[in-house]
Image (cartoon, rainbow, N blue to C red):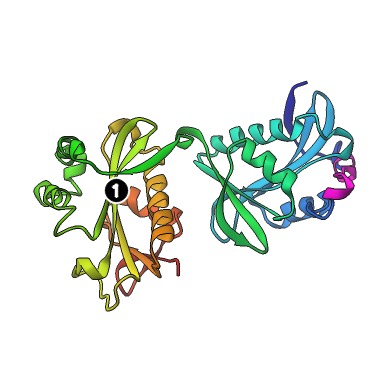
Amino acid sequence: MEVSLRQVTRDNLRECIQLKPSAEQQGFVAPNVISLAQSKVEKDWYPLCIYAGDTMVGFAMYGIDADDRKMWISRLMIDENYQGRGYGQAALKRLIDLIEQHGFTEVFLSIEPENITARRLYEKVGFVSTEQVIGGEAVFRRSIGMCDRRLHLRNIEEADIALMDVWLHKPYILHWYDDPGAWMDEIKQRNGSFAFIHHFIVMDEGRPIGFCQYYDCYSAGEDWYSVQTPGQTYSVDYLIGEEAYLHKGYGKRIIQMLVDRIREETQAKEIVVQPEEENLPSCRALISCGFEYNQTAAYYQLIIG
């Protein structure tokens, strides 16, 4: 039976309020009446009824969080009389399709750590843990749309040098990376003078699509920041070498992967980045990854320690 999402109206309001999850799940899900009240006070939240055919079987709510301005699924419940029929998974897929229409490339949700049933459901449709905990709940994230791809980073190899040279001489990259020779020298000396820089090729499954790196600012000693202690302040760079991947949210994905690497592999306290003010896509990508602009220092900063 086809699952659809419908607006909450005067005609179905009472039925929506009367929906309830199974007894063992009631401690994990807020009553629908609370969610409906929240949507009236916080205008960026959108409640929906879940239907199987013409039968209401559940409730969902999604919207933009006022604090981080990211898209979240804050509620998903299937009535106790209709559980175990695949309606939750089908409704999640409908929600993701709907959120993609809003132009978002990722969506978040959070669950109680003890709610194993919900975790299995979300992981089944592609949500992965961010390792964050907010309000005692574990946060999960899923990429959507064009960014719903299996990107990964691998260490740069000698065979990548020629491709890097091609990328660095493309006009749209030269606009921001105006000295390809210097970049190539750093990569070629990655096992010597520039061993403190961690260089990666960005892969879309088996296809190289870009380059990125992170490094300890103390070792780099650049003049746009002041760092007195090694191992605490890091910076990142990236480029998208294939035009087909521009303006589709991949920059944000690459930044997030670099942030994850730094969290996993270092004891960093902060990440700082100073893109040109005119490079709006990069500035926006940094902000969407949680960076904030430090007016005094004139760079973007993410506190992670």
In magenta, the rendered stretch is 14-25
Q: Main secondary structure of the magenta part?
A: helix
Q: How many marks?
A: 1
Residue situated furthest top in the rendering: 1
Q: Tell me, yes or no, if residue 249 can be seen here.
A: yes
Residue situated furthest left in the rendering: 181
User: Is residue 151 magenta-colored?
Assistant: no
Q: Position of residue 181 (x, y in %)?
A: 9, 48
Residue 67: quarter of image? bottom right
Q: Is residue 188 left or right of residue 136?
A: left
* Residue at the spot 30% in from the left edge and 35% down from the top edge: 209
Is the C terminus in the top left, top right, bottom left or bottom right quadrant? bottom left
Which kind of residue does numbered mark 1 sit on?
Cys
- In the displayed structure, 135 sits above or below 97; it is below
Q: Which residue is mark 1?
A: 212
* Residue at the spot 40% in from the left edge and 56% down from the top edge: 259
Q: Position of residue 105 (x, y in %)?
A: 49, 41
* Helix, strand or loop for disc 1: strand
Q: Tell me, yes or no, if residue 8 can be seen here.
A: no
Residue 210: quarter of image? top left
Is the N terminus in the top left, top right, bottom left or bottom right quadrant? top right
Q: Is residue 177 left or right of residue 138?
A: left
User: Is residue 18 magenta-colored?
Assistant: yes
Residue situated furthest bottom in the rendering: 228
